[in-house]
Image: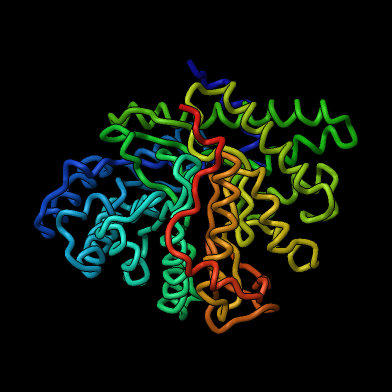
């Protein structure tokens, strides 16, 4: 049992160190909504979302008031629409209509975002998957709260390079269709390798087919709390450093466990997982970069950055798994550039580059996240960057992701403004040498030999 006293001891964290429950995400299976008639399918989807999630926002707000814990976002994830729409959709336009219905349902229940406009194509694409992928630019341009993700690789199956090539083109087209808002559509689009079925964080959340009919997943974040704790052990040994991170992560995760359990009870939906991810925001003091600086780096990107991030990520997970039997999702440290003022400062100082960020993704929770690049970056270059990041995930048996934003009409030295939780980002340079002949090859990159563990 989790007592109120365990929450009261975190008051200082909540009031002064930016501890919050970043999201309560209700995962909803839409498998029983499938119909060969598109209009009936949309009606089924709408009914189920309204029935299960109608009280999600009110419940989150109520729990936040009761325990004094900010519950920042309430979200929904659904079964990948590439599966759900396969029987009904005959064109890209049919998929876009489903996206619009999802958006209307999300607005009606009041959630911030709805994830799951997704396809899982790690080994190959169905006709429906391919149509959904091609429909993403229009779907994101015509909706406000829908988020999209495509899983193009896994350790077990390799990387579907046909899907990687298409996603480079899709990201470019999405940027063009939302260029009036600094190509913000791309901020709602993630390309994955080894995507988990229970991730509560957007834009990559979807409700995997291994999940039940509905589930409550909670994402907790507290980089400011970790930084404050580390200030008290400045200059101490690595042992003391690691123990401090673990103990702090334990307390943060217990907060998430409490909120998840209460939400589960009040909504009548089973508890799934707590995702303890140090996910930054543009708020002052809520930065993963500042944790790395507290560990001893002048800026993220300096020599030692990858080692420091590896240490942080591992200790966060060790502390989290002691606090809850069901830690899942991505859990670790996020390094989104636009959402972390410390990362932005490091880019502007010339310390942090795209290549260094890629190295850091080998040891953190996700990948190249919320990175603004020049608007004239070619689709093949974007695909090449995706392929590199997918290879890191495949070989290292971990989740990696790419959320690149080619900001149409802007170049290196300029700035993209996204607003709110998404923040702003300096346009980062990319390698301009050509990889198109590599990207144009058809087929899959095979799975690594260590994946054969049957």
263 to 15, vertically: above or below: above
For this view, does 280 lie left or right of residue 230? left
Q: Nearer the viewer, residue 350 or 92?
A: 92
448 to 437, vertically: above or below: above
Residue 295: where, in percent of width, then height?
A: 81, 42
Residue at 35% across, 38% down: 59
Residue 45: where, in percent of width, then height?
A: 19, 50
Residue 102: where, in percent of width, then height?
A: 26, 57
Q: How many marks?
A: 0
Could you tell me which quadrant the C terminus lies in?
Answer: top left
Q: Based on the displayed image, in which of its 4 quarters is residue 245 positioned?
A: top right
**Residue 203 seen in the figure:** no
Residue at 48% across, 47% down: 158
Residue at 33% across, 34% down: 210
For this view, does 318 lie left or right of residue 2? right
The single residue placed furthest to the right in the displayed view is 235
The single residue placed furthest to the bottom in the displayed view is 409
For this view, does 231 lie left or right of residue 406? right
Q: Based on the displayed image, in which of its 4 quarters is residue 442 positioned?
A: bottom left
**By what rule are the colours in the image chosen?**
rainbow
Q: Nearer the viewer, residue 38 or 227?
A: 38
**Residue 352 seen in the figure:** yes
Residue 86: where, in percent of width, then height?
A: 20, 54
Residue at 59% across, 81% down: 410
């Amino acid at each position: 049992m989790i007592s109120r006293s365990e929450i009261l001891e975190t008051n200082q964290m909540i009031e002064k160190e930016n501890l919050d429950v970043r999201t309560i995400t209700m995962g909803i299976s839409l498998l029983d909504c499938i119909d060969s008639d598109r209009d009936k399918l949309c009606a089924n989807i709408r009914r189920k979302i309204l029935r299960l999630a109608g009280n999600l926002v009110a419940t989150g707000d109520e729990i936040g008031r009761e325990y004094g814990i900010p519950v920042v976002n309430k979200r929904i994830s659904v079964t990948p629409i590439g599966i759900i729409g396969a029987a009904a959709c005959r064109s890209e336009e049919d998929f876009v209509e489903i996206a619009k219905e999802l958006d209307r349902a999300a607005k009606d229940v009041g959630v911030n975002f709805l994830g799951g406009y997704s396809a899982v194509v790690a080994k190959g694409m169905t006709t429906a998957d391919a149509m959904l992928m091609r429909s993403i630019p229009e779907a994101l341009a015509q909706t406000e709260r829908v988020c999209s993700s495509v899983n193009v690789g896994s350790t077990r199956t390799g990387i579907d390079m046909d899907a990687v090539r298409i996603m480079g083109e899709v990201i470019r087209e999405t940027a063009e269709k939302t260029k009036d808002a600094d190509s913000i559509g791309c901020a709602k689009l993630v390309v994955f390798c080894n995507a988990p079925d229970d991730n509560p964080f957007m834009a990559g959340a979807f409700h995997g087919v291994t999940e039940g009919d509905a589930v409550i997943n909670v994402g907790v974040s507290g980089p400011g709390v970790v930084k404050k704790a580390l200030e008290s052990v400045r200059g101490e040994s690595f042992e003391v450093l690691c123990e401090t991170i673990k103990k702090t992560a334990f307390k943060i995760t217990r907060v998430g466990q409490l909120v998840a359990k209460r939400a589960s009870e009040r909504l009548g939906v089973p508890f799934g997982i707590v995702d303890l991810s140090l996910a930054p925001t543009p708020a002052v003091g809520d930065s993963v970069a500042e944790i790395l600086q507290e560990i001893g780096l002048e800026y993220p990107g300096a020599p030692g950055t990858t080692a420091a991030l590896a240490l942080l990520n591992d200790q966060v997970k060790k502390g989290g798994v002691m606090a809850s039997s069901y830690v899942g999702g991505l859990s670790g440290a996020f390094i989104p550039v636009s959402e972390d003022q410390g990362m932005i400062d490091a880019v502007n100082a010339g310390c942090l580059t795209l290549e260094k960020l890629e190295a850091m993704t080998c040891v953190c929770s996700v990948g190249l996240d919320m990175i603004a690049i020049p608007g004239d970056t070619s689709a093949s270059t974007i695909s090449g960057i995706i392929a590199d990041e997918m290879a890191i995930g495949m070989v290292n048996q971990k989740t990696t992701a790419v959320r690149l934003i080619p900001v149409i009409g802007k170049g290196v030295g300029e700035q993209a403004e996204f607003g709110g939780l998404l923040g702003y980002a300096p346009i980062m340079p990319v390698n301009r040498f050509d990889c198109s002949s590599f990207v144009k090859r058809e087929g899959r990159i095979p799975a690594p030999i260590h994946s054969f563990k049957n």
